[in-house]
Amino acid sequence: MNVYDFDGTIYKGDSTADFYLFLIRRHPGLMSGLPAFAAAAVKKKLGKIDLTQMKDQFYTFIPRVRSMDGELALFWQTHMKNIMAWYLLQRRPDDVIISASPEFLLRIPAERLGWERLIASPVDPVTGRYQGVNCKGEEKVRRFREHYPDGHIDGFYSDSWSDLPLAKLADSAYLIKHETVCTWDTKAKHK
């Protein structure tokens, strides 16, 4: 099976940031939580909170979205075009998509692209609260093994060095740089 990160890998950009910007254009009042999120980002930088706690603060806008299903449908009407062509040419039914983005945000592209194997951050689409840990770095390995204990990764694709733990499990790993698929030397040191 091939395993793919989502944002910056098969989706041009960051789907969570794009969704938030889409929402604040339609509902500017959702920006009111930005100062608290900025404070959480500083706390994260200082090591006082972890990534999941910081993102929990960011998602406090979610309970104020009146029709999440409707907003998601509208968002993906205009953002499916951000799925990169290189991926569309090679996608397979047994692909596994593993992402730090909220699972509820990726359900529509999963349906449209026929992904039956989606692993993403467990964020409640009503409360905006995490129901677990942000799916990044070593957490991706843990979640992959939880879903596929005997899973064998033929190829792994990501745009981020934070995915190195998962890349090391693959027969072949590829780093995506500006929509170009490059061989990833998982033994090389990175900055």
Image (cartoon, rainbow, N blue to C red):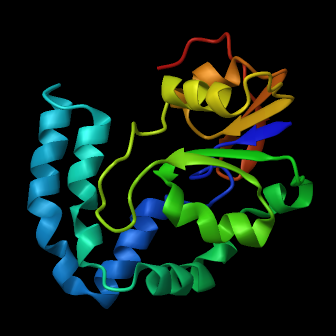
Residue occupying the point 87% across, 29% down: 154
Above/below status of 77 relative to 45: below
Q: Is residue 62 left or right of residue 96?
A: left
Res 59 quadrant in image: bottom left
Q: What is the quadrant of residue 40 in the picture?
A: top left
Image quadrant where one finds the N terminus: top right
Position in image of residue 65 (x %, y %):
30, 79
Q: Is residue 136 left or right of residue 6?
A: left
Query: Residue 131: horizontal and vertical position, in percent?
Result: 37, 46
Residue 183 locus on image (x, y percent): 79, 29
- Residue 51's place in the image compared with 71, above or below, is above
Q: Is residue 175 visible?
A: no
Q: Nearer the viewer, residue 122 or 50?
A: 122
Q: Residue visible at 75% across and 39% down?
A: 3
Q: Is residue 67 above or below residue 178?
A: below
Residue at position x 25%, y 56% in the image: 58
When the figure is inspected, residue 75 is found, relative to residue 20, above or below; the finding is below
Q: How many labels, in total? A: 0
Decide if residue 115 is on the left or right side of residue 166: right
Q: Position of residue 153 (x, y in %)?
A: 81, 28
Which of the 4 quarters of the picture holds residue 163? top right
- What residue is shown at x 41% (from left), y 79% (from top)? 68
Q: Is residue 134 left or right of residue 89?
A: left
